[in-house]
């Protein structure tokens, strides 16, 4: 991930929700890429962007090498920590959180996410729209998004993902405000 995007994430005020003694892996899954940022002691330790997103997977443009790079990066960057907490943002994880009947900001466990994945994949795309009430633009991408989140959780040994109702949009707004105030 670029330093600029990491700054935007930091400006989204996720650090206000961070416990200084915990390690967090910020996960933002988009259509074209997945952005990861590791925070320890409320400071950015490492970040990276992977060309692995929901639309790429649906279009069969995801490559095994990219999946392997993601797994290796997550494993390598989290192995020295006793416990890493996931922070997921974006429309897909927000929808998964709502489907899990979790309250806002309540974490989703790996087991719950895996159960949701099996539940969602048991329906066709049309059924996910008509029976589950998913929007057309969400019904297809939610499956690959869940696969990405589960992979990151597995290789980072994350027991749960917190889903705050804050994301890059909030960070962009805070960054713009900050820049305008400094002029």
Image (tube, rainbow, N blue to C red):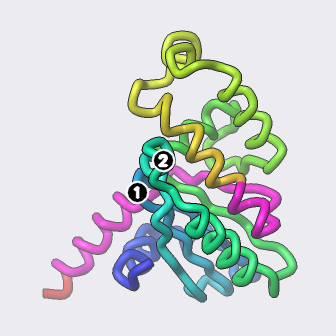
The reply to whether the C-beta atoms of the residues labelled 1 and 2 are less than 8 Å apart is: no
- How far from the left and from the top, in percent, is residue 70? 62, 70
Q: Is residue 177 magenta?
A: yes
10 Å neighbourhood of mark 1: few (<14), some, or many (≥20)? Answer: some
Q: Residue 78 bears which disc, if any?
A: none
Which residue is most to the left? 183
Res. 4 image quadrant = bottom left
| Residue at image location 50% in from the left, 48% down from the top | 57
Region of the chain picked out in magenta, as a range: 151-180
Residue ID at (56%, 68%): 66
- 113 displayed left or right of 3: right
Residue plotted at (50% across, 69% down): 50
Tell me if 124 is positioned left or right of 3 in this view: right
Residue 165 part of the magenta segment: yes
Q: Position of residue 93 (x, y in %)?
A: 57, 46
Q: Residue at x 46, y 65 (%)?
A: 51
Residue 25, horizontal then vertical, whole percent: 64, 71
Going from the N terminus, do you reach mark 1 or mark 2 first? 1
Please give the count of numbered marks on the rendered protein.
Answer: 2
Instruction: Classify 10 Å Cα crowding around label 2: few (below 14), some (14-19), many (20 and above).
Output: few
Q: Nearer the viewer, residue 12 or 91?
A: 91
In this rendering, is residue 80 above or below 178?
below
Kindly identify which numbered label has been placed on residue 32. Answer: 1
The answer to whether residue 26 is above or below residue 20 is above
The quadrant the C terminus occupies is: bottom left
The residue furthest top is 131
Task: Tell me residue 75's x, y (percent).
Answer: 75, 76
Mark 2 — residue? 60
Which picture quadrant has residue 137? top left
């Amino acid at each position: 991930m670029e330093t600029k995007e990491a700054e935007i994430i930091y400006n989204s005020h996720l650090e206000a929700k961070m416990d200084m003694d915990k390690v967090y892996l910020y996960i933002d899954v988009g259509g074209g890429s997945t952005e990861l940022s590791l925070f320890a002691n409320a400071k950015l330790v490492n970040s990276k962007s992977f060309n692995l997103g929901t639309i790429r997977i649906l279009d069969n443009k995801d490559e095994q090498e990219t999946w392997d790079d993601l797994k290796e990066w997550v494993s390598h960057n989290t192995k020295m920590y006793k416990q890493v907490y996931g922070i997921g943002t974006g429309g897909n994880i927000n929808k998964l959180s709502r489907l899990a009947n979790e309250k806002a900001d309540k974490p989703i466990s790996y087991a719950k996410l895996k159960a949701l994945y099996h539940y969602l994949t048991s329906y066709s795309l049309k059924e996910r729209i008509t029976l589950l009430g998913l929007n057309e633009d969400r019904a297809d991408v939610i499956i690959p998004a869940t696969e990405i989140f589960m992979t990151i959780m597995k290789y980072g040994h994350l027991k749960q993902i917190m889903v705050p109702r804050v994301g890059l949009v909030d960070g962009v707004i805070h960054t713009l405000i900050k820049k305008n105030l400094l002029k």
